[in-house]
Amino acid sequence: MSAQLTKTHSQRDTDRLVAAGWTLKSEFRVAPNDEPYEYLLAWEHGGEAAYWRAKTWDEQGCEVCRQQWLSKGEIPNMLGGANGGVLLYRCDTCGTFWEETTREAHEITEAEARKVFPHLFQEAENHA
């Protein structure tokens, strides 16, 4: 039996596949100390591989925050940034966390936000 293979280009997508049962086989970097730019995973369980379906634009956040992204390119409550220019926003209306990369903005869970932006949550907890 040969394993099914897939690749991703983000830690977030890799984490989701690992949680679904995939095995991380390799991380590719330009230089040894660089952040990975690509991840190779294998499905080693036999049968149909497990995936997740990304939410469509209309399934993310609320009408207010989606409209703010479309009209202004951001929502007002920017919480801060992380390495690589990734920004975290939170909608004041529905509380959805949004991650903005150089390519897109998309909804992320609070757990994902805490993993990518731990310093922002630590700062907020220190000031509470």
Image (cartoon, grey):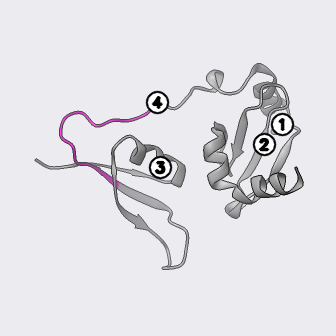
User: In the image, is 10 to the left or to the right of 40?
Assistant: right
Label 4: element kind: loop
Label 2: element kind: strand
Q: How far across and down, in percent of the image, does residue 67 sit?
A: 80, 25
* Residue ID for mark 2: 89
Mark 1 vs 4, N-terminal side: 4
Label 1: element kind: loop
- Which of the two residues, 80 or 31, is positioned nearer the viewer here? 80
Looking at the rendering, the stretch of residues picked out in magenta corresponds to: 41-52
Marks 1 and 4, Cα distance to the nearest angstrom?
25 Å
Q: How far across and down, in percent of the image, does residue 18 sit?
A: 40, 48
How many residues crowd mark 4 within 10 Å: few (<14), some (14–19), many (20+)?
few
Give the residue drawn at x 83%, y 25%.
93
Residue type pointed to by label 2: Tyr
82 lies above or below 34: above
Residue type pointed to by label 3: Asp
* Residue ID for mark 1: 75
Query: What label does residue 53 carry, if any?
Result: 4
Residue 81 visible within the image: yes
Mark 3 touching mark 4, by CB under 8 A?
A: no
User: In the image, is 25 to the left or to the right of 97?
Assistant: left
Marks 4 and 2, Cα distance to the nearest angstrom?
23 Å
95 lies above or below 82: above
Mark 3 vs 4, N-terminal side: 3
Mark 1 vs 3, N-terminal side: 3
Query: Chief secondary structure of the magenta span?
Result: loop
Marks 1 and 2, Cα distance to the nearest angstrom?
7 Å
- Which of the two residues, 58 or 125, is positioned nearer the viewer here? 125
Q: Is residue 121 magenta?
A: no
Front tag of 3 and 4: 3
